[in-house]
Image (cartoon, rainbow, N blue to C red):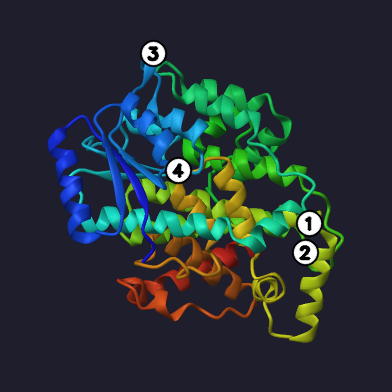
């Protein structure tokens, strides 16, 4: 077990004492520092250079600036975990902090759960910083930046006075975004009895989290080059991603996930193949994968990637979303959606849902999928698998029908 350097930030001295006892009992090889305010935390971080920060919400530094945002800006490699006494997962303070924190845990939190989250987040960072992935990323001419429209939407959502209709007006300024929103809301995905032609009305029907995922995906989708490789279609990828998002959210719900978990599962399902869009501009990469597949007829695209490069489009996509600061569960699900058990411990519901949704739908499309048996035997997944398989069949038939 790799020792980690931590910093705990909490105004409650009893909480800090509890963290000290926790590490001494369960992870004696780890080192940690403790701060009761944001200013001391920043000063300590300059010297300590920790792997992770575990903090309460609303911790500030000079001029009441937010500690989480400061660490995100000046120490981007530090894993940022909120361990909060805020009980409402939809509270404004938590929603606002989603732009800066990697993970959220509620007090009281079992010690093993907290430490397991630190270890899982550290393992994800290790996957996204592997030598093979860095070499692949360095060969790309560019990595797209977070769309300006997404920034505008997030900023607008932070206003307590904003209405969904006004958010629709933001979307209406972007032609490609409006086109895709109206296309989706009028598809069998929603099964509405009439056509919707107003983007404001469409936004109300879609909801905020679907809208956010669409902005990310559509911006990449329309910026992607036309594929010159036989058998690869951007339209097919869009349809598969849409169905994966839908099934992933349903699986997360069946696994008992909160509304936040279900939203993350939808977003991860929508974006799980985003790495493929980045790799379309790497003809040598695609050609080598096709060559591997020609040598072994039953080799899947992802298996050929790992054989040739020891990494894949999954990790490439996770790397991009990590740069964009998306929630850790989403980044993890995208990066590991072909190898869900490469991160130790129990698989998160977001990752499990994304992996299963993608695998089941790929099976229905005729792909050869070798399921991860370790994951299939976890929790209620084994008992629920037949129902999810049936749902994947219905979604696939629905797509073909339309």
Rendering coords of residue 77 (x, y %): 50, 44
Using the image, determine if residue 308 lies above or below residue 326. Answer: below
Upstream in the sequence, badge 2 or badge 1?
2
The Cα atoms of the two marked residues, 2 and 1, are separated by 10 Å
Q: For mark 1, what is the residue?
A: 280
Q: Which SS class for mark 3?
A: helix
Q: Kindly identify which numbered label has been placed on residue 78.
A: 4
Rendering coords of residue 105 (x, y %): 29, 45
The Cα atoms of the two marked residues, 2 and 3, are separated by 52 Å
* Circle 3 crowding by C-alpha within 10 Å: few under 14, some 14–19, many from 20: few
Q: Kindly identify which numbered label has been placed on residue 232.
A: 2
Q: Nearer the viewer, residue 24 or 108?
A: 24
The Cα atoms of the two marked residues, 4 and 3, are separated by 22 Å
* Circle 2 crowding by C-alpha within 10 Å: few under 14, some 14–19, many from 20: few
Mark 3 vs 1: CB contact within 8 A: no
Q: Residue at x 19, y 53 (%)?
A: 22
Q: Quadrant of the N terminus?
A: bottom left
Upstream in the sequence, badge 2 or badge 4?
4
Upstream in the sequence, badge 2 or badge 3?
3
Quarter holding residue 65? top left
Q: For mark 3, what is the residue?
A: 63
Q: Can the viewer see residue 207 in this picture?
A: no
Upstream in the sequence, badge 3 or badge 1?
3
* Circle 4 crowding by C-alpha within 10 Å: few under 14, some 14–19, many from 20: some
Residue farthest toward the right in the current orientation of the protein: 228
């Amino acid at each position: 077990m790799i020792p980690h350097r931590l910093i705990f930030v909490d105004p409650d001295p009893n909480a800090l004492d509890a963290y000290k006892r926790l590490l001494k009992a369960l992870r004696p090889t780890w080192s940690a520092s403790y701060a009761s305010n944001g200013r001391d935390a920043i000063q300590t971080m300059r010297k300590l250079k920790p792997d992770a920060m575990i903090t309460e919400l609303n911790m500030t530094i000079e001029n009441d600036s937010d500690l989480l945002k400061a660490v995100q800006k000046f120490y981007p490699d530090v894993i940022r975990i909120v361990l909060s006494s805020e009980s409402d997962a939809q509270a404004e303070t938590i929603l606002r902090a989603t732009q800066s924190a990697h993970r959220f845990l509620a007090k009281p939190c079992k010690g093993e759960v907290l430490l397991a989250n630190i270890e899982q987040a550290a393992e994800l960072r290790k996957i996204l910083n592997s030598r093979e992935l860095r070499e692949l990323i360095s060969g790309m001419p560019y990595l797209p930046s977070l769309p300006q429209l997404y920034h505008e939407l997030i900023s607008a959502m932070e206003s307590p006075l904003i209405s969904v209709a006004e958010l629709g007006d933001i979307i209406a300024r972007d032609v490609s975004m409006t086109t895709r929103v109206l296309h989706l809301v009028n598809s069998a995905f929603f099964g509405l009895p009439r056509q919707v032609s107003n983007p404001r009305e469409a936004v109300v029907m879609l909801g905020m989290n679907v809208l956010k995922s669409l902005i990310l995906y559509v911006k990449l989708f329309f910026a992607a080059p036309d594929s010159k490789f036989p058998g690869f279609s951007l339209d097919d990828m869009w349809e598969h991603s849409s169905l994966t998002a839908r099934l992933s959210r349903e699986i997360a719900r069946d696994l008992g996930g909160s509304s936040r978990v279900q939203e993350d599962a939808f977003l991860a399902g929508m974006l799980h193949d985003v790495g493929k869009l980045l790799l379309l501009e790497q003809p040598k990469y695609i050609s080598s994968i096709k060559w591997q597949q020609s040598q072994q007829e039953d080799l899947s695209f992802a298996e050929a990637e790992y054989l040739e490069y020891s990494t894949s489009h999954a990790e490439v996509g996770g790397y991009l979303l990590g740069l964009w600061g998306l929630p850790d569960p989403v980044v993890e699900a995208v990066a590991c959606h072909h190898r869900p058990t490469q991160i130790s411990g129990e698989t998160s519901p977001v990752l499990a849902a994304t992996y299963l949704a993608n695998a089941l739908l790929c099976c229905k499309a005729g792909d050869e999928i070798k399921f991860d048996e370790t994951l299939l035997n976890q929790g209620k997944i084994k008992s629920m698998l037949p129902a999810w398989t049936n749902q994947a069949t219905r979604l696939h038939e629905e797509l073909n029908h339309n």
